[in-house]
Image (spheres, rainbow, N blue to C red):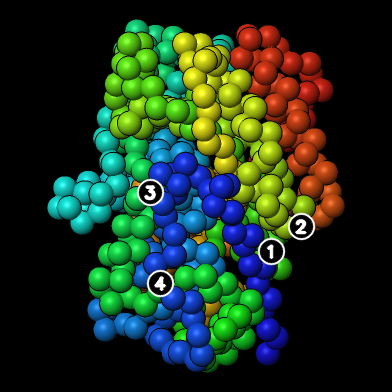
């Protein structure tokens, strides 16, 4: 039986880690795997997906022996690098319905609302201090072309009687964000922001407290399938009858998954603390905000008064090779700084202290997929979170736990299970060349539309080829 070669992540140097990770001095807590160990379920990846999967399995089958192998330290990947935005799947209910059908879409959306309640309960109980602030999520337009981007989701919710969003005008947005750049939008009130690294490391502590074994700095180099799957690291071997692959973008290198996944990077910056300036312009809440341009803009104010500003304009991986530029781009967050100054001209003199990147594993449908490897029914995977995961990963944990435990329930039967129904992407090098051209066109089109100009027809056509 053929071995599966893994492509270990390129760990970020301490100076290149996200603001979130540096702010709490996050690092390894547990020892690397050494020698031979066994367990009932092995999980590759110590981010949100891997940790929530472990916790869900423990909830359903407490006797299960679970070991997590993490390449760097828990939360060092996407879970500790993102924009910290928490909102339900109702914003994507139209996309979900197109893939999984109306019934499953509603079930999954409601499950993310429950997940937000669960996060709040964890914080309120003192179990995880994650700086959760449920001050709302705003989806806004700052140009004519962006108006109504939310209409399909908004109307779908109204049609099925789910009153999840309320309309916003310019005065509402100015009052809640301190910016007049956006003038139209909607708000999901039961949503907001977290400190994502605090959440990830809090989940690590919770997992350890519940008897889950974690080995950090233990990248898996090779998988030997079989009744007892063997996971080879630099210093040890872990054997288990069931394995979960939850290593996000790095799984795109697996030949079976490569046709369905493409990897891009999102870039984020953090300013120096300026709480008084933000208070003076009226930005006091912990709401998360998104601008509806195609290269989505997302931002928040931290409790200490920093501004976090992110945008999906970074690198594209060729043959899913994720190098050090996916940790930090080297351009000091130029695009984000430009957009920060457009949205908040009052912050032009404020220093940007942190800039970082992170790889995002994307499917054409912009929704995650869960399944097992075709020839290996005991090796499961969760991929394709597309940069939206804080309220979604707890739901993913339910799905993965049911698959691993062989349960037939709403989770294992939901329409996100099964990669065969997903869109296959073009092969390399056509994929890479085409993606670069399309992303260039999207950028040019975005820049024109932000100024309420129309891009030329060729640029518009190319931008429309994006999945």
Using the numbered discs, state the Cα–Cα distance from disc 2 to disc 1 in whole angstroms.
7 Å
Instruction: Judge left or right: residue 345 versus residue 430.
Output: left
Residue drawn at the location 42% of the way across and 35% of the way down: 91
Q: Considering the numbered disc 1 on the image, is that residue within a helix, a strand or a loop?
A: helix
Instruction: Judge left or right: residue 50 versus residue 61.
Output: right
> Measured along the vertical axis of the image, is residue 419 above or below residue 62?
above
Residue drawn at the location 69% of the way across and 15% of the way down: 448
Q: Considering the numbered disc 3 on the image, is that residue within a helix, a strand or a loop?
A: loop
Whichever of callouts 3 and 1 sits on the residue coming sooner in the sequence is 3
Q: Which label is found at residue 253? A: 1
For label 4, the residue is: 30
Can residue 399 be seen here? no
Whichever of callouts 2 and 3 sits on the residue coming sooner in the sequence is 3
Residue closest to the eye, 282 or 244: 282
For label 3, the residue is: 24
Q: Considering the numbered disc 2 on the image, is that residue within a helix, a strand or a loop?
A: helix
For label 2, the residue is: 319
Whichever of callouts 1 and 4 sits on the residue coming sooner in the sequence is 4
Q: Considering the numbered disc 4 on the image, is that residue within a helix, a strand or a loop?
A: loop
Q: How far across and how far down the image is residue 173, in percent?
A: 37, 15
Using the numbered discs, state the Cα–Cα distance from disc 2 to disc 3 in whole angstroms.
34 Å
The answer to the question of whether label 2 and label 1 lie on touching residues, with beta carbons closer than 8 A, is yes
């Amino acid at each position: 039986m053929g071995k599966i070669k893994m492509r270990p992540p390129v760990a970020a140097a301490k100076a290149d880690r996200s603001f979130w990770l540096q702010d709490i001095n996050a690092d390894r807590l547990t020892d690397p795997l050494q020698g031979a160990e066994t367990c009932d379920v092995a999980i590759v990846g110590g981010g949100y997906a891997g940790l929530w999967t472990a916790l869900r399995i423990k909830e359903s089958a407490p006797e299960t022996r679970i070991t997590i192998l993490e390449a760097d330290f828990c939360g060092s990947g996407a879970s500790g690098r993102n924009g910290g935005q928490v909102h339900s799947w109702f914003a994507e209910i139209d996309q979900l319905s197109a893939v999984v059908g109306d019934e499953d879409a509603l079930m999954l959306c409601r499950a993310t609302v429950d997940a937000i309640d669960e996060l709040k309960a964890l914080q309120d109980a003192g179990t995880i201090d994650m700086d959760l602030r449920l001050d709302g999520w705003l989806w806004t337009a700052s140009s004519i072309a962006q108006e109504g981007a939310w209409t399909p989701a908004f109307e779908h919710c109204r049609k099925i009687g789910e009153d999840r969003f309320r309309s916003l005008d310019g005065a509402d947005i100015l009052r809640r964000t301190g910016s007049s750049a956006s003038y139209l939008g909607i708000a999901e009130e039961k949503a907001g922001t977290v400190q994502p690294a605090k959440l990830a490391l809090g989940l690590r502590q919770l997992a350890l407290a519940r008897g889950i074994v974690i080995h950090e700095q233990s990248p898996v180099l090779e998988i030997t399938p079989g009744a007892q799957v063997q996971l080879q690291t630099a210093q040890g071997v872990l054997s288990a009858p069931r394995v979960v692959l939850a290593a996000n973008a790095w799984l795109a290198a697996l030949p079976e998954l490569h046709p369905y996944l493409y990897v891009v990077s999102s870039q984020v910056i953090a300013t120096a603390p300026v709480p008084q300036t933000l208070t003076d312009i009226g930005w006091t809440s912990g709401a998360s905000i998104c601008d509806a341009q195609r290269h989505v803009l997302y931002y928040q104010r931290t409790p200490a008064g920093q501004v976090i500003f992110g945008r999906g304009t970074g690198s594209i991986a060729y043959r899913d090779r994720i190098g050090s530029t996916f940790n930090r781009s080297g351009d000091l967050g130029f695009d984000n700084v430009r957009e920060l100054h457009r949205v908040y001209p009052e912050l032009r003199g404020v220093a940007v202290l942190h800039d970082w990147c992170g790889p995002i594993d994307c499917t054409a449908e912009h929704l995650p997929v869960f399944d097992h490897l075709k020839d290996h029914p005991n090796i499961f995977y969760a991929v394709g979170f597309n940069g939206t995961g804080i309220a979604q990963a707890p739901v993913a944990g339910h799905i993965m736990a049911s698959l691993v435990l062989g349960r037939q329930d709403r989770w294992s039967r939901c329409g996100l299970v099964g990669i065969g129904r997903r869109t296959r992407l073009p092969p390399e090098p056509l994929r890479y060349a085409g993606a670069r051209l399309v992303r260039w066109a999207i950028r040019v089109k975005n820049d024109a539309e932000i100024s309420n100009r129309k891009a030329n027809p060729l640029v518009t056509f190319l931008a429309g080829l994006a999945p």
